[in-house]
Structure formats: structure tokens, C-alpha cells
Amino acid sequence: MPCLHKFQMRTKSEELLFQEQLKQVAMENGRRLGLEGDGDLKFLLTGGTLVKVRSTSWQKSRYYKLQEDCKTMWHESRRTFKPKQTFSVEDIESLRHGRLSEGLQKYTHPSAEDRCFSILFKDHHKHLDLMAASAEDARRWVSGLEKLVSNMRSLSRQTKSEHWIFNCMRKADKNEDNKMTLKELKHFLRQINVEVDDTYAEELFKKCDKSKSGSLEGPEIKHYYDLLTHREEIDVMFKKYANSEGHMSARDLLTFLLTEQREQVGLGHAVTLINKYEMDETAKQTQHMTKDGFLMYMHHEDGAVLNPAHSAVHQDMGQPLNHYYISSSHNTYLTADQLKGPSSTEAYIRALMKGCRCVELDCWDGSSGEPVIYHGYTLTSKVLFRDVIKAIKDYAFKTSEYPVILSLENHCTVPQQKLMAHHMASILGEALVTTPVSSTMPTRFPSPEELKGKFLIKGKRLNKLNAVFSNNNSAEVDSVSEEDEAGDSKENGDKAKPKKAKIQLAKELSDMVLYCRSVHFGGFEHAKDSQAFYEMSSLKESKAFSLADTSGPAFLHHNMDKLTRIYPAGSRTDSSNYNPVPMWNTGCQIVALNFQTTGKEMDLNQGRFLANGGCGYALKPEFQRDPSSQMNPSSLSKGPWLQKKMFHVMVISAQQLPKVNKEKHKSIVDPLVRVEVCGVDADNASKETNHIENNGFNPMWNESFRFLVHVPELAMVRFLVEDYDSTSQNDLVGQYCLPLTSVQNGYRHVPLLTKRGDVISSAGLFVHLMLLDTK
């Protein structure tokens, strides 16, 4: 419970004492975050002046300081109506040290490189460009904030919940006297998204106001907090198995794990959990777990819906590259629509940081002699090819160490193609794969493990790969067909050139293409007879979906030794996405989506690559890799893929759901939960609970559903919480998606993500899940 005992009465004459108490609060919160005594944390708590950069002429000095809660940044403002402004450390997505943002590159001098940094927020439209007085100050700001962000993310949901409630209490304390009146209590309840009638609010208030003073303070607020956060459903479970004087012994806990959680573990694992989560040292020494320890366990990864073993790389990464689904982005450079939206290096950074392993570069001649990237024949802005390659080099392997594919759409003249090759060679260096991994002509793809930290180029090549071993050098420049996009001469909906158009290709660029040579798709028989394993086709969604419907088995077998890339139709000018699941069902590896567009499709993509450590590669099921497989995703004949399961879901409760409409002071969520299974056609299903009126804090449903799943290895599960509206479309409150094979049985907490895939701190669902064999 974070510092509720710090709510104490103070007067103006006690200001010095209060300031000392604030220091103690800061120290306590620093300790909780694992940063006790940290020099960078002390630096942030002291604060300092930074220059906020918006343009060449708008560069203002502002004082920034971390508040004592160690999670809120305060900064002064010149606005008369809002002289003090704050933002939460939890809202920070990442930090960039240097002149990496487009604003800093445009509005600051190169000599200020080491003094500049940017704060990027989870709302993708917001960021802060700042300049410190010295390079050392900039380093300490970035280092300190990165530590805070990292440690905040590692906190348990229980601890985040306590922080969240405490901060809501502080906001409700309007006159800042560290007491809560009945009026402030009602304001607090609205803050935490729960509507209560006046009678209940008054009853709760009187129950806690032991001093009869008309306000709550100190221990009374702590008592109020305990009443508010009481979890009856957890209590019932704990009491059922706590057979040792109100505690769970290690054997009691083991019985719970075997009976309710269906985990195949022994007594040693139960002892490990006690040592890991029990906070009471006396109980821990006797190998017992208290209710607080049990709640801590339930809120950590061991009690979460995602199998903790799957939160790290756990799959065989030694298979050929085409045996994996690969997280892939379409028109990666765009941050909005396809016609007039901005192009940005930041879009590449965001995609790579989310685990994307295949990014697209739409390359055109730049007016200054330098190649640029933009959506050709449209009003989208342009970004230098060189700057994009630098950004990719800097951020490619921060989230995942496995290979990144650069998918080139080359529209440049030969001189600028040579510049492209030069920039990639000089910037990417030895990380760029320019020769085959093996010393002899390969017959299959290398594995992600063999290609760790490497870049592959996808594009046109003047000759076959065996020319590398035969010393059969191609001409310095030659023509190649541009019709590699399934006969669609330009995938992006541009003013198309004739289908048989040729482009001139520089040898320097051609030679960089090894394992991903772009070729026109001439049908599955043609590919089988004439296409080498490293020759791959790109199919627009309509063509791919048609092939999946009419030639499912052939499509599946094609992908067993070749790569296939799918991309959105050119008509999707709003950057909307197609459903990726049917493409994964046919074994397609590079299913490219518009990462900048939120919605169910991107939820599914994030869910598909959530397991295996979020590394951007997911091993396809055996029946999508075995040449003897006869699976047809459209019609489920008998085979190893058919493993019928009954998926039982009980939606029990939710905790601390955020307000959807924060502008409306009295707006309260009316939540409902929808559970979806997405996989082969026979498995697609959706079921939802009733909505609960005016309670986003602790709604309880206790509603059960059953889903019959035929091919569990291809199934995804998506949990959605929505704000019910009888007159219009429901608003999304939060969502979470994961492979069915990564779901843990038993009582589990489900974290909730925003529409952009960021974790909603402290919010979650509590469910009971069971995946059982069925005849």
C-alpha cells in the first residue's frame, strides 16, 4: 500500500517538516521501484531547466522535475490558466537520445546532438523534443527516465493498482490538506470509475470515520482503501485451500495448483512460488503463504493468462526461415493514410520496437540527388533513404535479436540505386548479409538463429543465386521486369505502368539480394517447377484470399519451401487492414499490415507474436511444415491438425477499468466483456457478457461460455472490454489477444491493452479458463 499512512495533517508552520516527509515518500517510492539511492533518480527529483523545442523560433526554457511519487513529471508552463503541468511516467513509450526526431533534426544545430533527447508517449501523436544544458545532463535525464519506465513496467499489477488508487486519492484531495471529506470521497469514486448512490457513499464514509471528525485521515484512509479493494472472489479461493490457520502451506498451495490451475508441478514449485511472492518473512520461513502473498502471486506472471514460459523465446529457432510466421509491416514509412499522410523515420522505429521483422521501403529519386522514401504519386511527405537506414540500424535489434528483412520497392534510376547500395553497405556494415551463409550453393533458407543480428534485402536480382558460386558476373546494369506484384505492376495503388514494364537495375543493388529475390507469381505449378527456394512472390490480399479459398492445399505446400508476402489492397487509402488469420492458416509467412492503424487486425497480429518472447518469429505448426501434410484450411479432413478441444471460459470480474470519455467529469463505464476465438472457419466464434451499469472499478459477471475448437494450433483468443452504448457503437475500453496454445488453465488475470497495444496500468480481467480434450 503506497504511503497512505503519509496522509497527515499539516499547517503552514510545519512546511519544513512536510518537505522532509516528501523526501521520505520519494525514498520509499524509489525503494519500491528498486532505485533506492540511485543517483539518476535523485537527479530527476531535484529537476532542472530544459529547452522545449517546437520550431526554429519557438524554443522555451522550462523547469522539469520528478514528483515525490516517482511516477509523475512536473513542468512549469507559461499558460496563465495552467501554470503547472504534469504527465505520468507510465505514459512514456520510449526515449531517444540525440537529434533523432524530425523536429530536432530540423530545428536544432548538429553541434547540439549530445544535448538533445525526445520523450515519446504511448499516444502516438505526442512527443516532447528537449535540449539540456550539457551532454551529461541529457544523458542523466534519459538514463533516469529509462530506469523509471523499465522498473515501472516490471511492477506487479497489484503494486500498479495501489499506485493508481493512491494517485486518484491525491487528485480527489482538492484542498491538499491530506484529508478526505465526503464530497472529496464522491469525487474520488468518480475518479476510479465507479458510480455509487449517496447513501452507500455516506455509509462507507461513516464506517471509516472512526474519529467522527467529518473527514478521513491517516489510518482511516488506509481502512477505507482496504474496504474498497477487497476481492471477494480471491477470498473464496484462498479460504478453500488455506488449511493452516488461515495460511496456505506449501502443500495447500500445491493442491490449488494441481486442482484449480491444472499445472503439472511438484512441491518444490509451490515452495518456489512462496519464496517469490510471499512478503511476510515469518510466513516465508515456515513455507506458508498469506492472503497478501497469494494475491501477489495471482497478479504476477505465474498467475497470468499467458504461459510464463512463452514470454521468452522458447521455440526451436534453428528451422529454415520459411518455417516461421514473420511479423511484417506494409508501407512502414507512413504514420497515417496512404494519400497525404506524413512519412517518418519514427514509423520504422515504432514498428521495430514492436517486434516487426520485415519493413517496407518505397524508394524514389530525390530532387537533391539523394534517394527518398514516400508513397509514390501521392501527397505523402518524403524522408531520406539514408536517414531511414540509420534509424533501422539503430533500432532493429533492441526488441529482438532475430533477422530483419528490408523489403525494397525500387523506383529509382541507376545512379540513385547505387547510392542506395552504398548507404546500406556503409551504414549496416557487416550486419548486412551480402554472401550466402554456406560455402556451397544452398538448397534451403538459413535459420533465424544463424541470422541473428543480420539484415536481409528483399528485391529484384539480375541473375540466379548460383551465379555467386560460378563467378558468372552479370552486367553492371541490366533490365528486369517490374511485374513482381502478382501481375499488379504497382502494389500501392499508384498510377500503374504497363504490366510488362522494365526497370534498369544496378549491379551493386542486385548483388545485395540473396535469400529474398522478388519474382512474379505465375501459379503454384509454375513455382514448383521453375522457382528456386529463395525466389518469392508478393500477392495482394484479393489474389491471396482467392487462392486460399480455391487452392488451399497447394498454397500450403507452396509455403513449405518458399516465402510468400501478402499486402493490403491499393484501394485501402485509409490504411485499413485485412484479416491476417486466413493467410496464416495457409502458411504465409510475411503477412504485411499497416502498423499505424489500430483495430482487430493489429490486435491479432500483436497476439500472434506475443508468445516466443515477442521476437517477431513464430514457428508454424508441424502440419504446415511437413511435405506429407494434406491439410486444407477450408475443409477439415482428418489429420494431425484436427485436435478437437472444448475451451471453457468464465468471465468473473474486472478491476480498475479506465474511463473512455475522460472529458466528461461524471462519465462512468458500463462494461461488457466479449471473448472471441479466431482460427480456421469452423473455429471462428464470439460470445459476450451482459453489461454492468456504472461500474468500471470492480464489475463482476460470473458468466460462462464454451467454444469448440477443431485446430487449436491455429486458434487465437481475443478478450475485449467495451463500454456499452444502446444508441451507438460500443467504445473499446481494453483488449488482449494471444495464441490459444499459450493460454494457462485455471484462475487467471488478463492484462488489458489500449487500441495501440500499450498496457493499461492496473486494469485487468479475472477469468477461469479450461482447455479440455473432447471426442
Image (cartoon, helix red, strand yellow):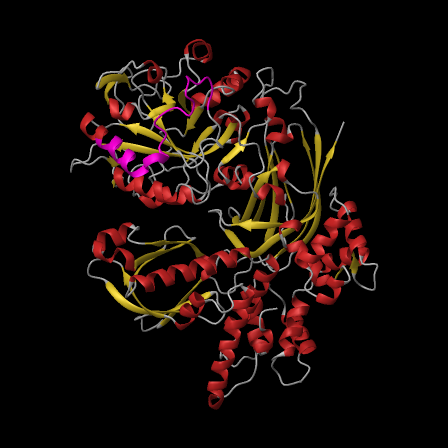
Asked if residue 533 is positioned above or below residue 565 in the image, the reply reads above
Q: Is residue 610 above or below residue 85?
A: above
Can the viewer see residue 76?
no
Q: Quadrant of the C terminus?
A: top right
Residue 665 in view:
yes
Q: x and y percent of residue 731 in the render? A: 51, 49
Horizontal side, residue 557 vs residue 43: left or right: right
Q: Nearer the viewer, residue 57 or 732?
A: 57
Looking at the image, how many numbered discs can be counted on the residues? Answer: 0
Q: Position of residue 590 (x, y in %)?
A: 45, 29
Taking the image as shown, residue 706 lies to the left or right of residue 529, namely right
Based on the picture, tell me whether residue 425 belongs to the magenta stretch.
yes
- Residue 484: in magenta span: no
**Residue pushed farthest bottom?**
13
Question: Residue 522: x percent and y percent?
Answer: 40, 13
Residue in the picture at 61% in, 47% down: 673
Residue 267 vs residue 217, the one in the foreground: 267
Q: Say whether residue 435 is left or right of residue 591.
A: left
Region of the chain picked out in magenta, as a range:
419-445
- Judge from the rendering whether residue 354 lies leftward or rightward of residue 520; answer left or right: right
Looking at the picture, does residue 551 appear above or below residue 316?
above
Question: Quadrant location of residue 745?
Answer: top right
Residue at (30, 64) in percent of width and height: 132
Residue at the left extreme of this rendering: 368
Could you tell me which quadrant the N terminus lies in?
Answer: bottom right
Q: Tell me where residue 62 appears, x and y as whole percent.
A: 31, 69
